[in-house]
Amino acid sequence: MAPSLLAADWGRVTEEVTRAINSGADWLHLDVMDGHFVDNISFGPQMIQAIHESNDIFLDVHLMITRPDHYLPRFLACGADMITVHVEAEHNVAHTLSEIRKAGVLAGLALNPATPFEEVIPHLSNIDLLLPMTVVPGFGGQAFMEDMMLKVEAAAAFRSEHNLNFHIEVDGGINAETAAIAAKAGANVLVAGSSSFGAKDMKAAITAMREA
Ligand code: DX5
Ligand code: ZN
């Protein structure tokens, strides 16, 4: 379970991170948006550095930015444990993934709902995580796109056929009900914003999603 900080109370970030950790979060999902790749602006490496300096939780950084290659050195230096870049962004995808791994950070590759699974196939032997988005990225609180489970199933099938071992993460519209659907399709990392930070009892919400 990876709660997304995007849905936290940003006036109390430190307390919110602690709340996620105490509620049983395995990873903390950090959504970086540049106002260009997606129609929203969030936060950058300084925020991630601050969270890294005061916590031990695994930091799962999701870069929704047009030029991940340009900003990569800064994100590699801020304490991220995993950096996920989009296949649709303007960069040499293979090179960016190899730079991430060279720095000793886990490399993830995300694809938007409109992007076919075939686009990521050339990279599947060089990643630690695949993220088929279950919403159009940019905002929390959107509805889960169940038809994206075809991509999750295709990725899981490809992985076993080729003896690979990347994680499959889903992000967008995850709650106890959709978590079960995604897990059944083959996802093993579930990102949840609204349904985790938005819950009164975050621990109960995370437990419910994990059990689902
Ligand atoms: C969407 C982000 C998500 C977002 C998920 O652009 O990548 O991580 O925070 O939010 P929910 O869980 O509310 O759909
Ligand atoms: Zn995300």
Image: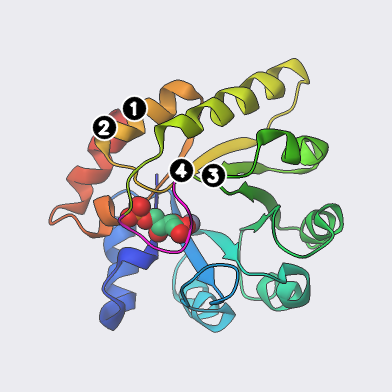
Q: Nearer the viewer, mark 1 or mark 4?
A: 4
Q: Position of residue 185 (x, y in %)?
A: 47, 23
Q: Earlier in the sequence, mark 4 or mark 2?
A: 4
Residue beneath disc 2: 177
Q: Earlier in the sequence, mark 1 or mark 3?
A: 3
Residue beneath disc 1: 180
Q: Position of residue 63 (x, y in %)?
A: 60, 64
Q: Quadrant of the N terminus?
A: top left
Q: Nearer the viewer, mark 4 or mark 3?
A: 3
Please say if the residues under marks 4 and 3 sit with CB atoms less than 8 Å apart: yes
Q: Mark 2 vs ligand 1: CB under 8 Å?
A: no
Mark 2 residue crowding within 10 angstroms, few (<14) / some (14–19) / many (20+): few
151 over 21 or under it: above or below: above
Q: Nearer the viewer, mark 1 or mark 3?
A: 3
- What is the number of the mark on residue 134? 4
Q: Quadrant of residue 141?
A: bottom left
Q: CA distance from mark 4 to mark 2?
A: 14 Å
155 over 45 or under it: above or below: above
Q: Earlier in the sequence, mark 4 or mark 3?
A: 3
Task: Judge by depth and name the residue closer to the eye, 36 or 163.
Answer: 36
Determine the secondary structure under disc 3. Answer: loop
Q: CA distance from mark 4 to mark 3?
A: 6 Å
Answer whether residue 131 is visible to the viewer in this image. Answer: yes
Residue ID at (29%, 68%): 8
Please say if the residues under marks 1 and 2 sit with CB atoms less than 8 Å apart: yes
Give the magenta range: 134-141
Q: CA distance from mark 1 to mark 3?
A: 19 Å
